[in-house]
Amino acid sequence: FMWHMSNSPALPLLGQVISDPVGTAANRRLTAASSDREGMLWACGLIVICNLVSAVVAAATDAMLNYVSWKKILFFGFLTQLPRTVGIAVIMRVADSNRVLLSATQILHGVSASVNGMSCMVV
């Protein structure tokens, strides 16, 4: 329950920020060629990055369950949520909502989602 509470609002809000052609500063576009269509591709890229990372980590998690207890792996999965959300806040504040950096936070989301999903199946 707590994983879903911490995870569910982050992706829609991140998608809204990354698809907005206007940056965080007033009257400033992210790039000169930014458009709404380009923003939608970035927002879709967030989901693709998460799913690709999740597939790789799910296979690794399955192999690790033979050597490490599921409680430690589940704790690690929960622990990746904190740097992800803090990273999003810092990038939005310091790096003017850099799309590449915001997209990179989805790597941690993929780790967290796959570990949560695999551990729930084991338990």
Image (spheres, grey):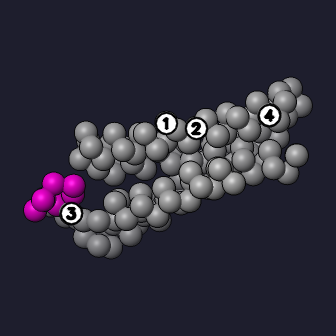
Work out how far the residue at label 1 is from the one at label 3, CA to CA, in angstroms.
Answer: 26 Å
Tell which circle, 3 or 4, labels the residue nearer the N-terminal end: 3
Tags 3 and 4 touching, CB below 8 Å? no
- Give the x, y percent position of residue 81: 56, 42
Work out how far the residue at label 4 is from the one at label 1, CA to CA, in angstroms.
Answer: 20 Å
Taking the image as drawn, is residue 55 in sight? no
The circle on residue 83 is 1
Q: Nearer the viewer, residue 45 or 96?
A: 96
Principal secondary structure, stretch drawn in magenta: loop
Work out how far the residue at label 4 is from the one at label 2, CA to CA, in angstroms.
Answer: 14 Å
The circle on residue 80 is 2
Q: Amino acid at mark 2?
A: Thr
Tell me how many marks there are.
4
- Give the x, y percent position of residue 10: 48, 55
Residue at the image position 60 percent from the left and 48 percent from the top: 110
Determine whether the residue tagged by mark 4 lies in a helix, strand or loop: helix
Q: Disc 4 designates what residue?
A: 71
Work out how far the residue at label 2 is from the one at label 3, CA to CA, in angstroms.
Answer: 29 Å
Residue at the image position 70 percent from the left and 34 percent from the top: 75
Determine whether the residue tagged by mark 2 lies in a helix, strand or loop: loop
The circle on residue 22 is 3
Label 4 CA crowd tier, 10 Å (few <14, some 14–19, many 20+): few
- Give the x, y percent position of residue 45: 47, 60
The magenta segment is 23-30
The circle on residue 59 is none
Q: Amino acid at mark 3?
A: Val
Residue at the image position 72 percent from the left and 44 percent from the top: 115
Is residue 49 shown above or below 44? above
Tags 4 and 2 touching, CB below 8 Å? no
Work out how far the residue at label 3 is from the one at label 4, CA to CA, in angstroms.
Answer: 43 Å
**Front: mark 2 or 3:** 2
Tags 2 and 1 touching, CB below 8 Å? yes
